[in-house]
Each structure stands twice: as C-alpha cells, then as structure tokens.
Amino acid sequence: MEFTQSIGQYLASISWDSIIGSSLRILLIIILLWFVMRFVKVMLGRLEKRLLLVAEGEPPSETQKRAETIVRLLRQAAIIMLWLTGALMILREIGVEIGPILASAGIVGLAIGFGAQNLVRDVIAGFFFIIENQVRVGDVAIVNGTGGLVEAVNFRTIVLRDLSGVVHVFPNGTINTLSNMTLDWSGYVFDIGVAYKEDVDEVMTVMKEVGQGMLDDEYFGSLLLEEMEIFGVNAFADSAVEIKG
C-alpha cells in the first residue's frame, strides 16, 4: 500500500505539461533537422550539376572528378555541423545547460589544438589540395614515391590503391611530393626495341601508321588527344635499338 502511494505521489509530482512540451519541441527539432538535411542534399545536387558543366579546355571526366570530390567533402562537413547543432538543442530541451558545455568545449579545443598540431596541419593541407584542384578521386597519382589510383580525398588524408590492391593512406600534412599523372590529360611514353638488322626509318614509319590507324579507329580515336609522336632512336641496348615515342 505504501509503495503504491509512493508511486502515485511521484507521478503526481511530475510536470507532465513540461515533459510533453519538451518532447514536442525535440520532435520538432528532429523534423527540422531532417528537412534541413534534405534541403542541403538538394542544394549540393544542384551545385554538383553546376560544377559538371564542362569548363573550357577541360575534359568532362576531369570536371566530374572535381565535382564529386568537392560535393562529397561539403556533404560531410554539413552533416557534422547539423548533427552537432541538433544534439546541443536537444540537450538544452531535456534540461542540460549547454553554456558550460560550450565553454568547456572551447577550453578543451584550445588544449587539443596545442596537442593536435599535426591534425590541424593535415586539415589545412587538405583544404589547399581541394581548393587548388591538385588531385581528385579517380586520378592516378604518385604520393611520396607510391603510385596508385586515388580512391578518396579527405580533409585529413588521401587514399591510394596500388596495382597490387594495397590501400595506402597518407596524412595530407606529410605529403612532400605529389605527382598527378592524369590531371587534365595523360601521356604514355614507350620504348620499342628492334633488332640491329632492321631499318630504323621503316620501323618508325610503321609505328606512325599504327598510330594513325588508332586515331581513325571508332573506339580508340575518341580516347586519343593527338597523333603519335616518334622521338627517334633513344638508346643502343645490348641486343636492340630502342626507339622512343
């Protein structure tokens, strides 16, 4: 009997109007966050379409890679900011004072800033990589001597996958050398070895005919920027004459 009375007194002491009001406000915040995220998604989609407009002198594939990289990073930043803001608003509705949290976050952020200089350096370097359009997802690049396909360009890291399928992750602040092999266009340099007894001039003529045949081909022609350029004899190897083109 006493237990039932205690439960009744506890329930009577609860401010149901306040709980219902807070619950409705929290629900409203969640719904508002959902609409804002939908709005951001639509606006980023429009931005991507605008970025996909082919720039003068730039192949469509290059424009697409740049657009995908920028939009993906903006989406990540927007989601983090929205969820953080929503979480603080919900905490305030359930009675948690967010003022001390924000103040503590500022102090902790300052302390972390001194201890996370490498992280700050990585983010700043990644920001300039993206703004200066140095490398994009889908490029073939050599980073610090390691070559591979760029699978991700983040604010903090660049991710490469080499020919063996090995994934290499490079913090942006540690990248000393970055060679982009497919920025705007790419070229293939080849060395053809022929026997010493062969007529070098005739070999180069055949090579030019093959190159012209590829330009005239329905499939390969659209993939080539210009006709093959033969430099001539490059080296005399042990058993062959090397012709570079």
Image (cartoon, rainbow, N blue to C red):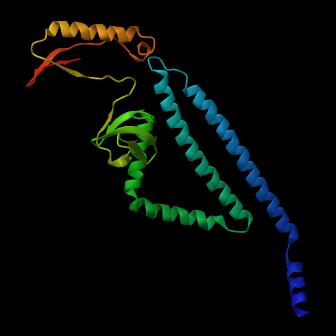
Q: Position of residue 142 (x, y in %)?
A: 31, 37
Image position of 22 (left or right of 177): right
Residue 209 image position (x, y, % from top left): 29, 7
Residue sitting nearer the eye, 171 or 195: 195
> Looking at the image, is 243 positioned above or below residue 213?
below
Looking at the image, residue 48 lies above or below residue 10: above
Quadrant that contains the C terminus = top left
Percent of width and height locating residue 72: 54, 40
Say left or right for 24 vs 239: right
User: 235 above or below 143?
Assistant: above
Nearer to us in this view, 85 or 193: 193
Q: Nearer the viewer, residue 21 or 153?
A: 153
Question: Which residue sits at x=37%, y=55%?
Answer: 118
Q: Is residue 88 left or right of residue 206?
A: right
Q: How many marks?
A: 0
Q: Residue at x 89, y 79 (%)?
A: 12
What residue is drawn where x is 71% and y is 49%?
33
Q: Position of residue 170 (x, y in %)?
A: 36, 48
Q: Quadrant of residue 101?
A: bottom right
Say which residue appears at 70% left-offset and 41% top-offset.
Answer: 38
Query: Which image quarter holds the N terminus?
Result: bottom right
57 lies above or below 79: above
